Image (spheres, rainbow, N blue to C red):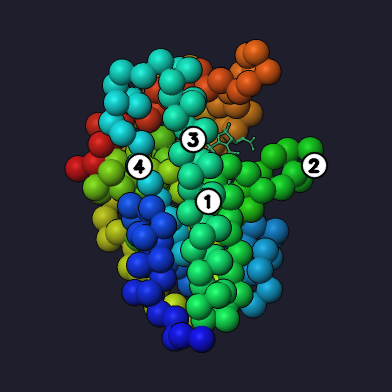
Amino acid sequence: MTELNRDIVKKYGLNAGASVVGIVACKDFSLAPDGFKPSDNLDGCRSVIVLGVPFPQEALTSMSNVEYTALRNAILTKMTDIAKIVAKQITKQSGYRAKAISASGGKYVDGKHYGTISLKHAAELAGLGVITRNDLLTSPKYGNLLWFSAVLTDADLIPDEKVPYNICVNCNKCVEICPSGALNNPALFGNKECGKFFVVENKKVLIKCFLCRKICPYRFGE
Ligand code: B12
């Protein structure tokens, strides 16, 4: 068994294919709803390792809805695989418990599909960026192009610092362009409204809108 620390964990993530890796202490999730705290999903959880990979910029500039959706599906599968690799390595090399968190889903509550934890909040707490007015995690380096997965572990790892400033200037362009009205209430994102643009065609989900991503002046970072 080898010692486990933040540098080793970050190396695992980068070697598995992540472009960014951030660490949060589980206690920082106190504001997450019950059932969505890391400790609700792994007994004795101490740290969350957040893994991110960006879309290429072309996803927002020149891809059709079909191409965008196909790339999104591929990247979500890749993100989940990266989390599984990191979780396996942690347990194998150090003996700590580790649980991979899927990039695309987790559980059903009252018939609705939810993630295991909120990966946007995890990424913000892990210092990978800030949640901006379009309700997306926006990174100083990669803008809103990042996709995430995570690993929960009972290892106590030194966490990262949050980004100490807000990138969003509240230009409101995302609110004005959103065809569903999902962004109208700054305190409550309209999941149901936004979800209407995820449509089933030929037995497959097609994402028909990503204007809140595309319109943001910080879509590609600062
Ligand atoms: C389900 C889902 C959706 C559904 C939601 C409706 C539904 N339930 O069916 C819909 C269809 C709306 C959707 C849309 C999109 N999604 Co989506 N989605 C998810 C998914 C898989 C789960 C979200 C979830 O259940 N979170 C858990 C619940 C409890 O969190 P919540 O509702 O956000 O939480 C609220 C409160 O409970 C509280 N809260 C919850 N946890 C915490 C924790 C802390 C510390 C605090 C303070 C508060 C807090 O704050 C929130 C506001 O009230 C996540 C992956 C994930 N696991 O996070 C991706 C995810 C959020 N989606 C993502 C993306 C990219 C999109 C789209 C852009 C896709 C597109 N159109 O191209 C749009 C974006 C819309 C937008 N502007 O935000 C990315 C975001 C990446 C980024 N850079 O921000 C994620 C993280 C996927 C990923 N693996 O990267 N999505």
Numbered mark located on residue 110 in the image: 2
- Eye-nearest disc, 3 or 4: 3
Disc 2/disc 1 C-alpha distance (Å): 28 Å
Disc 4/disc 1 C-alpha distance (Å): 15 Å
Residue highlighted by disc 1: 81
The disc, 4 or 1, on the residue closer to the chain's N-terminal end is 4
- Eye-nearest disc, 2 or 4: 4
Farthest residue toward the left? 222
Up-down: is 68 above or below 25? above
Disc 3/disc 2 C-alpha distance (Å): 28 Å
The amino acid type found where label 3 is placed reads Ala
* Residue occupying image coordinates x 37% and y 30%: 213
Numbered mark located on residue 54 in the image: 4
Up-down: is 90 above or below 53? below
Horizontal and vertical percent for residue 149? Answer: 50, 52
The amino acid type found where label 2 is placed reads Asp
Residue highlighted by disc 3: 74
Horizontal and vertical percent for residue 177? Answer: 39, 19
Disc 3/disc 4 C-alpha distance (Å): 12 Å
Q: Is residue 28 at all visible to an observer of this figure?
A: no
Q: Residues within 10 Å of mark 2 (few under 14, many from 20)?
A: few
- Eye-nearest disc, 3 or 2: 3
Q: Tell me the element at label 2.
A: loop
